[in-house]
Amino acid sequence: MPGGRPQESLLQHGAGAGDNRPPARGWGATAPSNRTRISRPWKVQVNFVVCQLFALLAAIWFRTYLHSSKTSSFMRHVVATLLGLYLALFCFGWYALHFLVQSGISYCIMIIIGVENMHTYCFLFALGYLTVCQITRVYIFDYGQYSADFSGPMMIITQKITSLAYEIHDGMFRKDEELTPSQRGLAVRRMPSLLEYLSYNCNFMGILAGPLCSYKDYITFIEGRSYHMAQSGENGREEIQYGRTEPSPNIAVIQKLLVCGLSLLFHLTISKTLPVEYNIDEHFQATASWPTKVVYLYVSLLAARPKYYFAWTLADAINNAAGFGFRGYDENGAARWDLISNLRIQQIEMSTSFKMFLDNWNIQTALWLKRVCYERASLSPTIQTFILSAIWHGVYPGYYLTFLTGVLMTLAARAMRSNFRHYFVEPPQVKLLYDVVTWIVTQIAISYTVVPFVLLSIKPSFMFYSSWYYCLHIVGILVLLLLPSKKTQRGKNRHEDIWLSQSKKFDEGENSLEQNSFYTTNNVCNQNQEMASRHSS
């Protein structure tokens, strides 16, 4: 799926005992033996689920017996790190050493290079190291070697390494007036210790399946400041602090575990009967009518999503069980536990635009791409962001086909929306009809775009697109050629313009992404004074 994939050892592109897709090894399509395909996936999937359930129990224990009010931040860092490394060693064996090597060398780069250029070197090294590991996993080891698939956690660690490097660069080198409001809110003003760095990258709550969180949010949780509100004193400093009663995450955890159970049940029963590979079956292509092809395309991709829902929601529940993920209170005074949530299922399935789907799918990865690439790109930020996403995902050709198609679909959808949507806002009946039509078009376009992501190899991907006569590619190109596009104003205030446009994209009415930072939410009113005082001190 665009924007990310869950931990691969659990659900390696939907692999399972009933998966009849021929796994692709690189550009060819050589399948491992049936024995390998049946025994290894189930063994590793069970292994991963057991580790995540252990992490869930450990999270409850961590919140109960190592609460910030009962023990020091140092001890919480040590325990979180050791438990995380133990789970990684249990799941991946000595391949888990890659996590320490990648994190350790990145930390040395940060210390040696200095704050001026460390973000660039950390970005190149972390992404390059990940890519080398992915190449060896795909082209050197057999595709069926699921036990060697350590690249899933490394994808999350790469996000954390690069995010923190940019946040330190913003906080310790750049001037406040050069930063966007979101960058100022996430800026880190001191170099983390090695223990804090390892704890952030390898803690047991997120080492197997994430999700990504900001360093500032993580440290706030470890130090027990997640439930404190800051208030400015007369001199502009945060002199007065008061706390609210710490909310219980139990209801949120139970709700998310129920979603996990339903998603897993759906995946184990329905998903296997609707393989995506059947879209390129020769008999199906020759005999099925066009409406049948369209319906099956949508249904097969719909059935492929529950495995992501399961993995990401379980990871979110583990963090919540440890007390991490609180994002303040809503207008009714209810606690919100979606600080690091990675998806919103209802909004995904009811998306009426490409933008709305991407806003709610793999949310933390979308934020990472925005913060390290889109906001900082000087030329074609949309294209650069999609290319970075493809490189981060791996080396399979299907990823690149999906994300290059995604660029075309995103730009075409943006042009269509800006040129036509305002004609269908009123009356309500017309708006309803518009929503129904755009929902159908969006779901078909999303399904059409992500088929190569599931098929992986280039030959079956082109077989699918040729069976559809590249129709949506052609439509997208015609839309871009024929419709006028509204260019984003760039120049001196380019970063602020981008942030304002993204704020509309992630506002509360459309399920805010940017406001996921608890720090930003609690301190938005006093942000300028706080940063000024920190800078002067």
Image (cartoon, grey):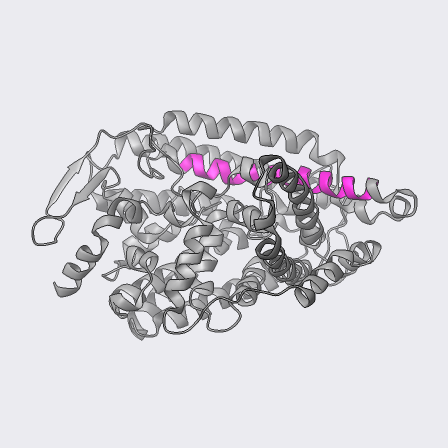
Q: Residue furthest front?
A: 427
Q: Does 418 sit left or right of 316 as displayed?
A: right
Q: Nearer the viewer, residue 285 or 122?
A: 285
Counting from the top left corner in percent of width and height, residue 214 is at: 36, 52
Q: Quadrant of residue 416?
A: bottom right
How many marks the image carries: the answer is: 0
Counting from the top left corner in percent of width and height, residue 326 is at: 33, 37
Q: Residue at x 53, y 35 (%)?
A: 49
Magenta-colored stretch includes residue 310: yes
Q: Can residue 156 be seen? A: no
Q: Quadrant of residue 177?
A: bottom left
- The majority secondary structure of the magenta stretch comes to helix
Q: Can residue 430 be seen? A: yes
Q: Does 382 sit left or right of 528 as displayed?
A: right
Q: Nearer the viewer, residue 206 or 364?
A: 364
Q: Residue at x 30, y 49 (%)?
A: 520
Magenta-colored stretch includes residue 482: no
Instruction: Examine the rendered structure and indicate whether residue 122 appears above or below residue 287.
Output: below
Counting from the top left corner in percent of width and height, residue 168 is at: 30, 63
Q: Does 23 sit left or right of 62 as displayed?
A: right
Magenta range: 292-318
